[in-house]
């Protein structure tokens, strides 16, 4: 008699403190151990956690690495987090958009959920461009404090529509 395997659910421990340093340390170690195993990397990018802050009690920010730029969600005891099986996707209603988040779990970080911000890692010209994508995503999607007024966005060439087109892998 065979048993049906159920997907492992990623249950996250609640993080009391900003996870930026833990994430950066993990991905630096991961890169050092497996850097040659990635089929596509952008050598102009570094490993950096950007803008992690509590949103509705949970931790949200952007993780930049040479192989991805992702919006990440980690449990902080708030209302955004929801336990789902590793690899499963759920849609999360955020103030500026509804985005798909996929569950993952790795030793050193624990459970987290992520939503890619770039269709292809080569789209980031350099670390400054990746930082702009992160900042734009956090402001457009989460409406974090300090968000620019629409006229300021237009003055520096940013539009929510343009950001979401880039997120979908389309050019303005």
Image (tube, helix red, strand yellow):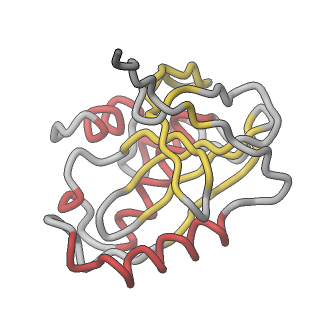
Q: Which quadrant of the structure image shows residue 26?
A: bottom right
* Residue occupying image coordinates x 77% and y 31%: 56
Front position in the image: 53 or 4: 4
Residue closer to the observer: 77 or 140 = 77
Residue at horizontal 47%, vertical 35%?
A: 86
Looking at this rendering, what residue extends furthest in the bottom direction? 32
Give the image location of residue 33, x and y in percent.
37, 81
Q: Is residue 108 left or right of residue 137?
A: right
Quadrant placement of the N terminus: top left
* Residue 31, above or below 65: below
| 84 horizontally vs 52: left or right | left
Instruction: Name the spot of residue 143 as percent of width and height, x first.
Output: 63, 35
Quarter of the image where the C terminus is located: top left
Which residue is depicted at the point 31% across and 38% down? 167
Residue occupying the far right of the picture: 16
Instruction: Give the total number of marks visible in the rendering.
Output: 0
Residue lying at the far top of the rendered structure: 1
Observer-nearest residue: 143 or 12?
12
Q: Residue furthest front?
A: 1
Task: Give the residue at x 60% y 65%.
Answer: 108
In the image, residue 63 sits, relative to residue 143, either above or below, namely: below
Query: Could you say where residue 48 lies in the image, as x and y percent from the top left?
Result: 51, 71
- Please give left or right for residue 75 compared with residue 166 in the image: right
Q: Is residue 18 above or below residue 97?
A: below
């Amino acid at each position: 008699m065979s048993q049906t395997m159920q997907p492992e659910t990623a249950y996250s421990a609640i993080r009391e403190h900003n996870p930026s340093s833990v994430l950066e340390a993990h991905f630096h170690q991961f890169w050092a151990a497996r850097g040659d195993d990635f089929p596509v990397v952008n050598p102009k990018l570094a490993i950096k956690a950007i803008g992690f802050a509590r949103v509705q009690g949970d931790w949200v920010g952007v993780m930049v690495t040479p192989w991805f730029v992702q919006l990440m969600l980690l449990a902080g005891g708030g209302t955004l987090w929801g336990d789902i099986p590793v690899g499963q996707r759920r849609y999360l209603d955020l103030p500026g958009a509804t985005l798909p988040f996929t569950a993952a779990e790795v030793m050193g970080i624990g459970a987290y959920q992520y939503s890619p911000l770039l269709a292809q890692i080569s789209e980031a010209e350099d670390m400054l461009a990746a930082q702009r994508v992160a900042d734009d995503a956090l402001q457009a999607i989460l409406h974090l404090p300090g968000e620019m007024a629409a006229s300021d966005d237009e003055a520096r060439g940013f539009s929510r529509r343009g950001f979401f087109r880039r997120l979908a892998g389309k050019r303005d």
